[in-house]
Image: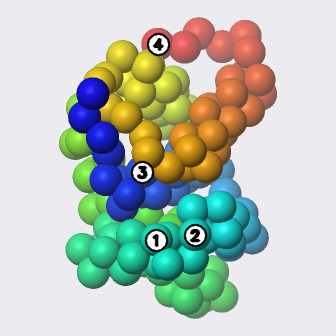
């Protein structure tokens, strides 16, 4: 099994959060939760790397965008495309089924999470979404 890098795991968490639907408070809570659960230093290193690569905005910029009335996800468009690329997800898939595709891919890929809090968050998010739409046909 190929291990996902810390930064990739964190980015996938924000990817899942985006498709679950999140406001600034949700983004802030996830930021704080992951920092606490992963360890402040390790989380900060992953976030710095993601921000330097233009794959996330960073919490300050998310807050500024939210104050300006703009959409305020953590992941940038480039970050979303990066996840689609590493997981071989179709970027043109119907948005409300994106978490279904994510779940199917994670279950069948040989990719391994090393950050248990991130893995737990992603699968919890997918399950919550599935419970909200239990009767819809998923891909």
Q: Quadrant of residue 102?
A: top left
Image quadrant containing the N terminus: top left
Say few, some or many: other residues with alpha carbon within 10 Å of mark 3 (under 14 / 14 to 19 / 20 or more).
many
Say few, some or many: other residues with alpha carbon within 10 Å of mark 2 (under 14 / 14 to 19 / 20 or more).
few
In this orientation, which residue lies closer to the viewer: 10 or 57? 10
Residue under label 4: 139
Residue under label 2: 39
Q: Give the vertical position of 8 relative to 137 (above or below).
A: below
Residue under label 1: 42
In this orientation, which residue lies closer to the viewer: 5 or 85? 5
Query: Looking at the image, do the residues carrying marks 2 and 1 touch, with CB atoms under 8 Å apart?
Result: yes
Question: Residue 59 at what x, y percent from top left?
Answer: 56, 81
Say few, some or many: other residues with alpha carbon within 10 Å of mark 4 (under 14 / 14 to 19 / 20 or more).
few
Q: Disc 2 or 4, which lies upstream in sequence?
A: 2
**Which residue sits at x=46%, y=13%?**
139
- The image's mark for residue 80 is none
SS for dot 4: loop
**Measured Cα–Cα span from mark 1 to mark 4:** 35 Å
Q: Quadrant of residue 11?
A: bottom left
Residue under label 3: 9
Query: Looking at the image, do the residues carrying marks 1 and 4 touch, with CB atoms under 8 Å apart?
Result: no
Say few, some or many: other residues with alpha carbon within 10 Å of mark 1 (under 14 / 14 to 19 / 20 or more).
some
Which one is closest to the eye, mark 1 or mark 3? 1
**Measured Cα–Cα span from mark 2 to mark 4:** 36 Å
Left or right for 50, reference 23: left
């Amino acid at each position: 099994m190929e291990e996902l890098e810390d930064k990739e795991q964190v980015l996938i968490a924000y990817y899942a959060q985006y498709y679950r639907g999140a406001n600034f408070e949700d983004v802030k809570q996830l930021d704080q939760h992951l920092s606490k659960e992963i360890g402040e230093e390790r989380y900060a290193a992953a976030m710095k790397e993601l921000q330097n690569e233009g794959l996330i905005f960073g919490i300050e910029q998310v807050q500024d965008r939210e104050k300006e009335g703009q959409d305020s996800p953590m992941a940038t468009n480039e970050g979303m495309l990066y996840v689609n690329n590493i997981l071989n997800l179709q970027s043109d898939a119907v948005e409300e089924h994106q978490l279904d595709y994510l779940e199917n891919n994670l279950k069948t890929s040989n990719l391994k999470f090393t950050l248990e809090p991130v893995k737990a968050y992603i699968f919890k998010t997918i399950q919550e979404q599935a419970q909200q739409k239990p009767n819809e046909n998923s891909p």
